[in-house]
Amino acid sequence: MGKITTTSFCYLLLAAMLFQFDFAQAQTDIPEERDYKVRPVRLGLKLGFPNLVGGNVEYVTPLLNDKLAVSLDYSTVKSDWFLSEEDNDENTDLDFSYLEGGVNYYFFKAGKGLYGGLSYSKFKFEGQTSVESDGKEGTGQIDYDHNSISVKLGAKIGGLFYLRPEIGYSFSSMPETFEYTAEYEDGTSETETYDLIEELSVPDIFFKGFMANIGIGFAF
């Protein structure tokens, strides 16, 4: 009789432990209660470097309790937007484009507040520019790409309308100079060096690997 009672008690104890484990597991699966609405789609504008000025799209996925988001930035700038009339002659036509995609993880709240990000970016500089060497005039054909992986820290502040400050670091900073091919009127060609600081008055901070921007937008 004592053996039966002891065995029954063990079974009851095991059942209670399993019930407690299942209840605790169920509790962790319930989404956390929030006093705000998670608006997963964000459309905005970013101003800073190295992206200069462009658009931003972010989508907050249901993963990790609505804390993991995917993000995409795109910028395009033409040389005639910032070159003077003297520098921007008929033979100069340069385009800058910046594309960045990555993921953001919101540390404390679902889809808002402080977050960390990991991204991959592609910087492209292409077009043509006037060149002169030893009295010869010609045209330089520019087609330069630069890719990098970056880490970022930012914050989404607000609801329907939001503000987004962001800082980061690129593991492969932009070079101050790059080489391109110059073709002259006499049929010869040479490899020349294009200096972004000298030619376009680009601030030196662009080439240190640091990233900083501020964005505004609407969430839906």
Image (tube, rainbow, N blue to C red):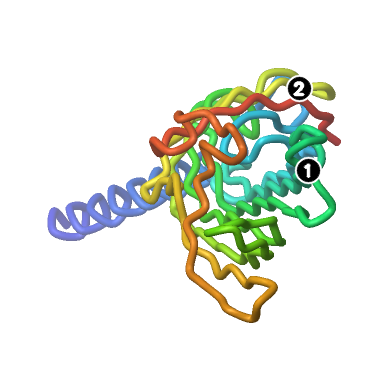
Per the image, label 1 sits on a secondary structure element best described as: loop
**Looking at this view, is 180 or 145 the one in front?**
180
Residue 7 position within the rendered picture, expressed as x and y whole percent measured from the top left: 20, 58
Residue 19 position within the rendered picture, expressed as x and y whole percent measured from the top left: 42, 48
Compared to residue 180, the image places residue 167 above or below, namely above
> What amino acid type is highlighted by mark number 2?
Tyr
- How packed mark 1 is, by other alpha carbons closer than 10 Å (few <14, some 14-19, many 20 or more), is some
Q: Which residue is mark 1?
A: 88
Q: Quadrant of residue 88?
A: top right
Residue 102 position within the rendered picture, expressed as x and y whole percent measured from the top left: 56, 52
Q: Identify which residue is drawn at 76% across, 25% down.
A: 216
Q: Which residue is mark 2?
A: 162
* Residue lying furthest left: 2
**Looking at this view, is 188 or 15 the one in front?**
188
> What amino acid type is highlighted by mark number 1?
Asn
Residue 201 position within the rendered picture, expressed as x and y whole percent measured from the top left: 58, 32
Q: Identify which residue is drawn at 13% across, 59% down.
A: 3
Q: Quadrant of residue 165?
A: top right
